[in-house]
Structure formats: structure tokens, C-alpha cells
Amino acid sequence: MSDRFVTQEEVERMIAAAIRQHNRNAAIISAVIGWTVLALFAEGLLRLIGKIPPLLPWLDLSI
């Protein structure tokens, strides 16, 4: 067996790398969710004002 211990510097580097990876993944997920919500909002608004036809004929929204 190896009696190798992890130094404090190695632990700090591992923690910093894990935080960097988490922040990058969280930013990507947040961007995808944000663009999806924005696209769905825009699509619903365009359907509401009549610029694009309703998805289902019985779902005709009008103001």
C-alpha cells in the first residue's frame, strides 16, 4: 500500500478545480434554460397577437 498523503495545497487546488467546473456547468445550464424560457415567451406572445397561427385550431387566443 502507498502511504501517500494529500497536502493542503493539493486539496485547495482540487477544491478550486471542482468549484470552477461547477460554475461552468451551472452557467451553461442556466443559459440554456434562460434561452428556452425566452423563446417560449416570445412564441406565446406572437401567437397571442396573431402573428403566427395557433398550434391547435381549438386553442385560438385573441385579445
Image (tube, helix red, strand yellow):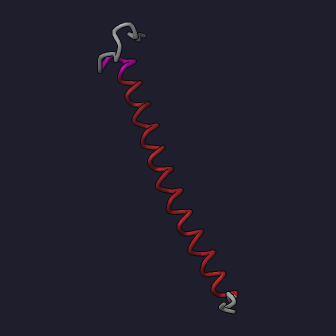
Q: Is residue 21 above or below residue 50?
A: below
Which residue is rendered at x = 34% and y = 16% of the image? 54
Q: Is residue 44 magenta?
A: no
Residue segment shown in magenta: 47-51
Quarter of the image containing the C terminus? top left
Which residue is rendered at x = 65% and y = 91% of the image? 2
Most prominent secondary structure in the magenta stretch? Answer: helix
The image quadrant that residue 52 belongs to is top left
Q: Nearer the viewer, residue 60 or 7?
A: 7
Which residue is rendered at x = 36% and y = 18% of the image? 49
Q: Position of residue 42 (x, y in %)?
A: 39, 31
Which residue is rendered at x = 55% and y = 62% of the image? 23
Q: Is residue 2 above or below residue 36?
A: below
Horizontal side of residue 3 vs 51, given as left or right: right
Q: How many marks?
A: 0
Residue lying furthest front in this view? 1
Q: Position of residue 14 (x, y in %)?
A: 60, 78
Horizontal side of residue 40 vs 16, given as left or right: left
Residue lying furthest left in this view? 52
Q: Position of residue 21 (x, y in %)?
A: 53, 67
